[in-house]
Amino acid sequence: MSLLRLAWRYLWAQPLTAGLNLLLLSLGLGAICFVLLVSEQIEQGVQRDLAGIDLIVGAKGSPMQIMLAGAFHLDVPTGNIPLATLETLRAQPLVAQALPMSLGDSLQGFRIVGSTPDYLQHYQARFASGQVWSGPMEAVLGAEVAARTGLKLGQTFSASHGLSQQGAAHGEEQVYRVVGLLSASGSVLDRLIVTDLASVWQQHEAHHAAGHEAADEEREITMVLLRYRSPLAAVSLPRWVNAQPGLQAAAPALETARLLRMVGAGTEVLRGFGLVLLLAAAASVFVALLHAVRARQSDLAMLRMLGAPPWRVALLVSLEALSLAGMATLLGLALGHGLTAVLGALLAGQQSLQISGAWVSPWEALIPLLAIGLALLAAAWPARAAFKLDVTELLQAPR
């Protein structure tokens, strides 16, 4: 312990140098920790939200936009498709399940999704209270929606037209009643309001046609989520859908790979920035320790004269670097989790992806090892120089 206290005092004998090295190490480790936490949560969130969805069918447009709008609810849909498309898809022998969705309204930025109870079952939704709707204009709220809006069972609310918070409100005669509150699942369902398809039709028929009720052949839905019956469907069904007038197929597996490649480019840049900071910190620690060994030659010689073996003198230099690495690890992990929490709060304010600063990645265990490895690498040559100090030469050197 006395050796560790001496190393600590030596480390902070030059506070500006020690502070700069600590800052560089902490920033580098924090950047790598931030990349680990965010990329892992995005990847797992994407896999969770796309589980069981093999194909998304929407109006003609960008497949990426259809996937972002239909699976993650992060974009506007490309348009509507006829309701008859749903029955056509269900009649396909290669389709095991077809889940319709109608979008177009929101509440305080949270999207209202018209669908069937099967949509809730697809995400294995669990009710915290209440039950699924039994008719039009009854809504089930995701956990985040309930928390942010404060709505309770039995209360009513009016929707806003459009998918943003700036949409015009529907009339007070068309209000939803909350019949169910879902438990938090970490999926896209947490930030959605789910209701019956007829609710969306009723809202928009009242909004656009002064209460005129449209026939089924006139009605539309926004998109359909498909689950294949066999792997053969992946080859033929998307091409068949794209050949139909006005329909566009989006394969989540392909579009997700493209999306993660685009996100991955940014994470690679940030990871590279963190590694550059770590290398700069290691070089700075190396220079600082080498200079310290040369400046403290008389002190180290005195330790040798008092009976300290060479390895203890070398260990003293190494402990300086390890102390710095220990502090940088704690600060880097705190910085990484703090930045992740800030990003999560910003995304939550936009009803976007769920990112949590409390997320713990098993890969974080590598961050202390990385810090220790860099510290030992930087201290290797200065420690060797301290180990090989010739006490006789130092005592005979003119002063």
Image (spheres, rainbow, N blue to C red):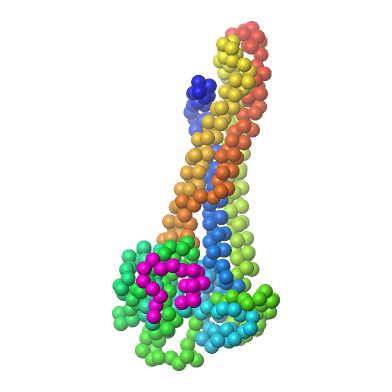
Q: Residue at x 53, y 52 (%)?
A: 37
> What's the residue at 61%, 80% (across, down)?
95
Q: Is residue 380 above or below residue 391?
A: below
Figure quadrant of residue 92: bottom right
Is residue 251 visible to the viewer in this orientation of the structure? Answer: yes
Image location (x, y in percent) of residue 235 = 69, 76
Q: Position of residue 293 (x, y in %)?
A: 60, 21
Is residue 162 highlighted in magenta?
Answer: no
Image quadrant containing the C terminus:
top right
How many marks the image carries: the answer is 0
Is 17 located above or below residue 347 in the figure?
Answer: above
Q: Where is residue 217 drawn, in percent x and y? A: 50, 91
User: Going by the image, does 265 lie left or right of 9?
Assistant: right
Q: Which residues are magenta?
A: 117-134
Residue 127 belongs to magenta span: yes
| Residue 51 horizontal side relative to residue 108, left or right | right
Q: What residue lies at 66% left-to-right and 27% top-to-bottom?
A: 381
Residue 180 found in image quarter: bottom left
- Eyeballing the image, is 126 above or below 384? below
Residue depicted at x 55% and y 79%:
98
Residue 90 spot, x, y in % from top left: 57, 84
From the viewer's side, name the closer residue of 317 and 76: 317
Please tell me whether residue 32 is drawn above or below residue 282 in the rendered image.
below
**Who is closer to the viewer here, 370 or 23?**
370
Question: Horizontal placement of 305 versus 15: left or right?
Answer: right
